[in-house]
Image (spheres, rainbow, N blue to C red):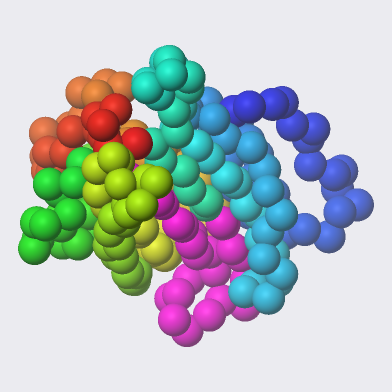
């Protein structure tokens, strides 16, 4: 992660122990070097307890001016309600947002939304993390340039909004680190990065599109 974090408050903190342990697992996770993660303010109205991270994928020297490029970014929120919520079918919930710009030819693929959703479920399955009640949307948007910007090539943006219930393990604590690792895999996929490590073939991860070329930036 981008910076070290202080430990959670001591036992006087009224935060439930399972949530405290899940947060510690998130804080201890170290993603691949191209992905930078840092804490961000969490939403207050979705659950009694929430913890949020924001992330960006950086490609050194990938910009036409040899500057660093950020082909994808996102946000992950871990929610906890000790009383549970009917829609979750559990006491924890992961809520995510991932955004990326793809090669223009990908934007015309009618199956793009289904493929993007399979990237998410495939990342979770490749990591072997148990989850339930997945839901979400995939939004595709195209940008076309005119006038003084007319020399730019069209671009296609994709946005994946999703949530799922991480199934709880011993002590009522989900494997938060594994869910974060799967989410980082998804970020790397939508950014067009090569796999950091060979995934389990049984996970069935869908092949990825190429990254944006300089002409599409």
Residue 214, percent across and down?
29, 28
Q: Is residue 139 visible?
A: yes
Quadrant of residue 141 within the rendered picture: bottom left
- Residue occupying the point 16% across, 62% down: 114
Residue 97, percent across and down?
45, 57
* Image vertical order of residue 101 relative to residue 158, above or below: above
State the residue in front, 140 or 129: 140
State the residue in front, 209 or 32: 209
Numbered marks: total: 0
Residue 91 colored magenta? yes
Q: Is residue 21 visible?
A: no
Residue 131, percent across and down?
35, 59
Query: Which image quadrant: the N terminus?
Result: top right
In the image, which residues are magenta? 77-101
Quadrant of residue 43 within the rendered picture: bottom right
Magenta stretch, overall SS:
strand
Residue 51, percent across and down?
65, 54
- Residue occupying the point 30% across, 41% down: 152
* Image vertical order of residue 194 relative to residue 39, above or below: above
Q: Which residue lies most toward the right here?
A: 12
- Left or right of 6 in this view: 75: left
State the residue in front, 136 or 143: 143
């Amino acid at each position: 992660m981008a910076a070290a974090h202080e430990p959670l408050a001591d036992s006087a903190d009224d935060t439930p122990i399972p949530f405290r342990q899940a947060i510690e697992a998130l804080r201890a996770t170290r993603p691949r070097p191209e992905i930078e993660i840092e804490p961000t303010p969490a939403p207050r109205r979705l659950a009694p307890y929430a913890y949020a991270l924001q992330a960006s994928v950086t490609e050194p020297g990938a910009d036409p001016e040899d500057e660093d490029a950020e082909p994808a970014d996102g946000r992950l929120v871990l929610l906890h309600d000790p009383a549970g919520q009917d829609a979750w079918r559990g006491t924890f919930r992961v809520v995510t947002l991932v955004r990326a710009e793809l090669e223009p030819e990908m934007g015309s693929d009618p199956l793009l939304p289904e493929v993007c959703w399979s990237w998410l479920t495939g990342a979770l399955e490749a990591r072997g993390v148990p989850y339930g009640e997945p839901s979400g949307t995939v939004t595709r948007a195209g940008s076309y340039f005119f006038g003084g910007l007319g020399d730019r090539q069209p671009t296609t943006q994709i946005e994946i909004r999703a949530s799922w219930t991480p199934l709880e393990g011993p002590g009522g604590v989900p494997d938060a680190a594994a869910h974060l690792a799967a989410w980082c895999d998804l970020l790397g996929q939508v950014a067009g990065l090569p796999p950091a490590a060979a995934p389990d073939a049984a996970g069935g991860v869908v092949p990825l599109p190429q990254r944006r070329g300089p002409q599409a930036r």
